[in-house]
Image (cartoon, helix red, strand yellow):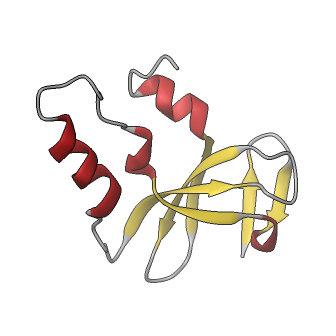
């Protein structure tokens, strides 16, 4: 599988490590009233979708960047690759 890295161009998937659902970018507020429950759900509950899914990938054998890869889990076709920092900023995360 080839990942079209936004900065480095096409790279083999063996250079990357899959780290889970891209919803991990949406870390709960640790000061919220229901923080314990929110962190339990954040850490342990995941969907297992069939079809298009956003995933976090880490370019371990390259520039060590974090990416959000939009991939069809049934065909493994990659439709979009973005820097995770850009996705996080678009979702309203400043840090």
Percent position (x, y) of residue 85? 59, 31
Residue pictured at 60% horizontal, 66% vertical: 18
Tell how many labels. 0
Seen in the picture, residue 81 relative to 25 is either above or below; the reply is: below
- Seen at 75% across and 70% down, the residue is 13
Residue at image location 79% in from the left, 47% down from the top: 64
Pick whichever, 1 or 20, lies toward us.
Answer: 20
* Residue 81 image offset from top left, x and y in percent: 62, 50
Position of residue 22 in the picture relative to residue 16 (left or right): left
Task: Specify the quadrant of the image occupied by residue 31.
Answer: top left
* Residue at the image position 29 percent from the left and 27 percent from the top: 29
Above or below 15: residue 58:
above
Q: Where residue 19 sits: x, y (%)?
A: 56, 61
Q: Which residue occupies the foreground of this view, 58 or 4?
A: 58
Which quadrant of the view contains residue 6? top right
82 lies above or below 14: above
């Amino acid at each position: 599988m080839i990942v079209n890295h936004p900065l480095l161009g096409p790279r083999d998937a063996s250079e990357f490590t899959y780290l889970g659902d891209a919803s991990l970018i949406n870390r709960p507020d640790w000061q919220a009233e229901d923080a314990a429950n929110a962190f339990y759900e954040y850490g342990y509950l995941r969907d297992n979708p069939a079809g298009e899914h956003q995933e976090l990938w880490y370019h371990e054998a390259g520039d060590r960047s974090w990416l959000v890869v939009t991939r069809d889990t049934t065909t493994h076709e990659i439709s979009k690759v973005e820097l995770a920092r850009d996705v996080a900023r678009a979702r309203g995360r400043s840090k």
